[in-house]
Image (cartoon, rainbow, N blue to C red):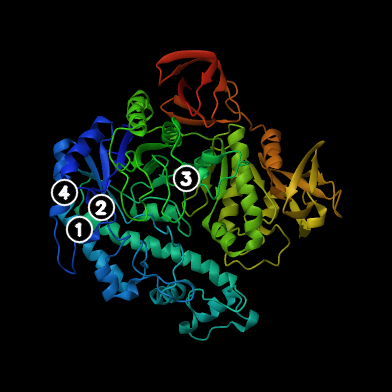
Amino acid sequence: MRKLIGGSSIDLGVCYYPEHWDKKLWAQDMDRMMAAGLKTIRIAEFAWNLVEPEEGKFTYRFFDDVLDLAGEKGMQVIFCTPTATPPAWLTEAHPEVLNADMEGHLIHHGSRRHYNYNSPVYQEYCRRIVEKEASHYGRHPAIVGWQIDNEFNCENSEFYSQSDTEAFRVFLRDKYKSLDALNEAWGTVFWNQTYTRWEQIYVPRKTNTGSVNPHLQLDYYRFISDSACRFAHLQAEIIRKYCKETDFITTNGVFANLDYQRLTRESLDVLMYDSYPDFAYCLDDYREEDPLKDRKWSRNLAEIRAVSPNFGIMEQQSGANGWNTRMEAPTPRPGQLTLWTFQSIAHGADYVSYFRWRTCTFGTEMYWHGILDYSGRENRRLKEVTNVSHMIKAIQGAAGSVYRAKVGILKDYDNIWDCQADRWHERVDRISEKSLFTALQQAHVPFDYVYLDETATWERLKKYEALFYPHAAILTPERMQLLERYVAEGGRLVMGCRTGYKEENGKCVTNHLPHLAAKVTGTDIPEYSFVAPDDGRVMVDWGGQLAEAAVFNDLLAPAGEGAEVLAVYVNSYYAGTPALIRNAFGKGEAYYFGGAFGMDTARLFLRKLGLEEPFSGVVELPAGCELAVREKDGTQYLFVLNYEKSSAKIFLKGQLLELLSGKSCQGEQSIEPYGVRVYQRSV
């Protein structure tokens, strides 16, 4: 069994950079970490030169000393491969390893993540450094896990080097086999883009109109993901030759243009996330009207949970963040560090590692504060972390429990990437994703993101009472077969405008819309339109209740015996036209809504479908509190998180044990600002 995220305990750790500090501080730092309840450190992700200071010259003494000291102190270590920051001697000798911008200008040495995944030269140097590190350190007893690289696709999620163009051609030849097939898939007859040789194809480049072929662009995003997955697999295969059986392999963060389900399936034991809720308070981006602020990070945690039901946080906010160039944000208020830690745990994290122990006194991140400030003196944040370490002792029974939800939001990478290539798609998707998440949060409805990838099964879907698939422009027969079975067996499926109008290559279909979704939704779409700016808000009437059909409107018609019109548009030239159709299909029902889901619409759907407040028989909560539920072996753990500056009142309908205090509670309870409660109940 793994020592971390193995189902037996919930643990805390911290990111540590011994290379930033005098060696005389190491032992003192580790003693203080252990005293604060931080038993694991992550090291070495930006330290290539400390192992290979010159090409072909390897030295292991620095991290030998760190690991031996950690072992002596009883600390565990997550060791990282250093490939996120290639050394100057490498990039100077081999500039072909560097990434480039869209116009072909090289991204030079001096920051991080300036390499490209597809350079054969860089792959060879990475293969060598990982082999050297893994073979030397792999059996060290202090090591419990390995992190590959650092934050794949962070800073840059697009790559335009010559190596990328050459690899893109290989990717396309493997996919399409012939230029005729590629030209057909990309519609290259438009604007005379037809290719007659593979060498004529490049990664996207600057064009006269500022846009590139959208079908090329869609395949390009798929290519980036494929490149990152292959680069991670290269390293994982090497590490597995040398690491102990109980060690795990991971990477950290969730960024664009990367299929994390595939990445994890092929290369990782668990995925970890870097959680920085303080971004909600960044000075340049703060929005007072935002109802969720730092609570929005629960959306990101739901994304990571869709990959790893039990996961880790490799970097958890512990101090003010900001580079010297951007992202300035305040120090967490008293209680917020605790709140954000439990936010992560509530969503399935069984390991939380704070970023970082000491605040570095130099470099781009010298204002990105850790637990300790520059001086290392005792402070409020260290006391709070220490208190958190005592608090989690009371919830160890929740280790290995998984988040429980009866509502799911369906996603797939085809549509995620199509949104990036297609402004029409992105407009509706952006508002619906934000509104559905906010509505679910405020109505205290635990939900999951559910990815329809190649491993998706009906058994995975059937546990959800309702599934939202807001704007699946690209549908495939395989996905629709799965969804039809889900509905036929009693599920409820909700789809929104702009569904089913594209093929997998991004080309629009010539069939009647919503194409593959027509059968299950009982819907025909004779006409559609963006909401005209002089129409204001287009509203629909659903049984006397009004809600907005935002951004785009499909004008609907029922098709089939089971189809029933539930709502009509009430303004614009199509007033009186059906806007919402419910279709009985087998034992279940499907809904097709002709707009994007604004906030009032999302709340109306939750109310009409009876999904609001699913735990109202147990606890009543104000909108400012989040409810998250984890479950294991017939026991539920209800996490109540107060994100407000003021105290919150909740009401328990029956007697429940509150684990952090050890007290049995009932009736009205008060939760302090940024406070946390964990209630246990049998089910």
Residue 150: horizontal and vertical position, in percent?
A: 35, 55
First in residue order: circle 3 vs circle 2: 2
Tell me the number on the disc at residue 290. none
Q: Amino acid at mark 1?
A: Leu
Say if mark 2 contacts mark 1, CB within 8 Å. yes
> Up-down: is 386 above or below 284?
above
How many angstroms separate mark 2 from mark 4 (CA)?
Answer: 16 Å
Residue that appears at 29% across and 54% down: 45
Q: Quadrant of the N terminus?
A: top left
Based on the displayed image, in which of its 4 quarters is residue 36 positioned?
top left
How many angstroms separate mark 4 from mark 3 (CA)?
Answer: 41 Å
First in residue order: circle 2 vs circle 1: 2
Residue 607 visible within the image: yes
How many angstroms separate mark 2 from mark 1 (CA)?
Answer: 9 Å
In the rendered image, which residue does mark 4 sit on? 139
How many angstroms separate mark 3 from mark 1 (CA)?
Answer: 32 Å
Based on the displayed image, in which of its 4 quarters is residue 606 positioned?
top right
How many angstroms separate mark 3 from mark 2 (CA)?
Answer: 26 Å
Q: Nearer the viewer, mark 2 or mark 4?
A: 2
Residue 676: horizontal and vertical position, in percent?
A: 46, 26
Tell me the number on the disc at residue 50. 1
Q: Nearer the viewer, mark 4 or mark 1?
A: 1
First in residue order: circle 4 vs circle 3: 4
Tell me if 407 is positioned left or right of 79 in this view.
right
In the rendered image, which residue does mark 2 sit on? 44
Could you classify mark 3 by the number of other residues whose Cα lies within 10 Å: few (under 14), some (14-19), or many (20 or more)? many
In the rendered image, which residue does mark 3 sit on? 329
